[in-house]
Image: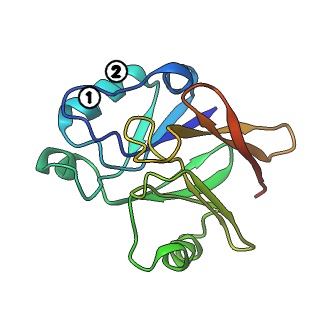
Amino acid sequence: MLTVISDTHSTDDHQLSGQTYEAVQNAEMVAHAGDFMCESVLDALQREATQLVGVAGNNDDTGIRERLPTTRQFTFAGVQFVMTHTRRGGPTALSLLGRERDADVVIFGHSHRPTVIESEECTLVNPGSHAQPRGHRAAHAEFDPQPTGELNGRLITVDGDVFESFTITN
C-alpha cells in the first residue's frame, strides 16, 4: 500500500493518529506532499515509515528545503506519480505538470482539502491534512495495488471512514 499525507504543519512531531497512523506504519511507501514545517517532523515521519518520499512545501523551513525537492517523480506498483506541494494555475497547471512528466497521478497539497479530480490525462489527488484540516475532514489517501495492474485509491478520514474511492489504470 502507498499512503499519502500532506500539510502536517507541526514544529515537533508527526501528528499521526488513528487510521492515518496505522496506514503510515503498514504502508510499503509513504508520500508527503509538503508543509512538514521543520526537520524534526520530517525525521519523526521517517522513523514511522518503511520508505518516505516527500517534497518541500511553501511553509517548510530551510532545513527541509535543503533536503527535499519541490517536485518529485516516483513509481509505485508500476504507476507513475509526480508530486508537488502547490502549483500556480490550479488544476490546469497540475494536469499540465502530469502530462509533462508522463504521470498517471499528480499528488499535491496546500489547500488542506481532500480532493480527487479525474481526467483523461491523469488523476489529481490532494490527500488533505491529517493534522490541520482547516475546516475540512482530517484525512489521507491510500493506494492499493490490484492483480490487474490497477491501483484502487481512496480518501479516508483519521477515524477510518472512506469518503471517496477511485481507480488508477496505467
Determine which quarter of the picture holds residue 125.
bottom right
Q: Indicate left or right for 62 with 6 as reference.
A: left
Question: Between residues 74 and 157, which one lies in front from this camera angle?
Answer: 157
Label 1: few (<14), some (14–19) or many (≥20) C-alpha neighbours in 10 Å: some
Identify the residue at the far front of this view.
135
Question: Between residues 78 and 43, which one lies in front from this camera angle?
Answer: 43
Disc 2 and disc 1 in contact, CB within 8 angstroms: yes
What's the mark number on residue 43?
1
Count of numbered tags: 2
Kind of residue at disc 1 = Asp
Label 2: few (<14), some (14–19) or many (≥20) C-alpha neighbours in 10 Å: few
- Give the residue at mark 2: 47
Give the image location of residue 35, x and y in percent.
30, 48
Secondary structure, mark 1, is: helix
Give the image location of residue 103, x and y in percent.
60, 64
Determine which quarter of the picture holds residue 140.
top right
Which residue does the image show at 44% across and 25% down from the upper left?
A: 49
Give the image location of residue 113, x and y in percent.
50, 53
Kind of residue at disc 2 = Arg
